[in-house]
Amino acid sequence: MTLKSPAASTFFSRRRRAQAARQDALPDWVWGAGLGVLVLIFVGAFFLVRQVSGGGGDDTCDKALVPLGQSEISADAFVTEEAALTRVIDFLNGGDRQAAEAAFFGPAHNFTHNVDPEVREKDESLARDLCHAVVTLEDDLATNGSNQAIAAEVDRVRLLLRDIAETLGYPRPG
């Protein structure tokens, strides 16, 4: 017969309680997934509040969009941009979101940023409209907006660029 000391008995009962608590605890991946969901909720709430409030105190479009890469601003460039944005809309209408994003992010996206300063010198209001449309489009793509809503926003950008081509003295594409 083995006699246990009171200290050993306490030690083993604490050990059993700790093991039981670990068995009842949620796995680490559940905690990680829960934390990830909370982060997504906060990010989504940020974008929602930003959309509803119009972007906060400072308007993003008070200044020209940040230039991206290099873009030639010419009649041919507006025709190329028209074709690129039409391709994006076709991909979205066909349900191919990845192809639409690939077609937009690159030279087409760069052009929307790079034409802003030039048009801003001639028509501030038109430049601001383009800026707001591009920012909305970028947000919709980042937050997984519906393909139909994104296609409508791409079309808005395309129509604005047609007006901008005329404002800058180029033939209206499309």
Image (tube, rainbow, N blue to C red):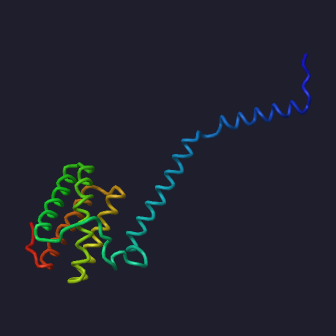
Residue 72 falls in which quadrant of the image?
A: bottom left
- What residue is rendered at 9% in x and 72% in y? 172
- What residue is rendered at 41% in x and 64% in y? 47
Q: From the top left corner, tell me how far across and down residue 142 is, in percent.
A: 35, 58
Q: Left or right? Give the position of 61 relative to 18.
A: left
Residue 130 falls in which quadrant of the image?
A: bottom left
User: Quarter of the image containing the N terminus?
Assistant: top right
Q: Left or right? Give the position of 114 relative to 80.
A: right
Q: From the top left corner, tell me how far across and down residue 109 is, in percent.
A: 25, 63
Q: Residue furthest top?
A: 1
Residue 63 sits above or below residue 6 on the image? below
Residue 128 falls in which quadrant of the image?
A: bottom left
Q: Nearer the viewer, residue 52 or 50?
A: 50
Residue 16 sits above or below residue 174 on the image? above
Q: From the top left corner, tell me how far across and down residue 4 is, in percent.
A: 90, 25
User: Quarter of the image containing the C terminus?
Assistant: bottom left
Q: Nearer the viewer, residue 36 or 168?
A: 168
Q: Nearer the viewer, residue 11 or 103?
A: 103
Q: From the top left corner, tell me how far across and down residue 74 is, in percent.
A: 13, 71
- What residue is rendered at 81% in x and 31% in y? 12
- What residue is rendered at 64% in x and 39% in y? 25
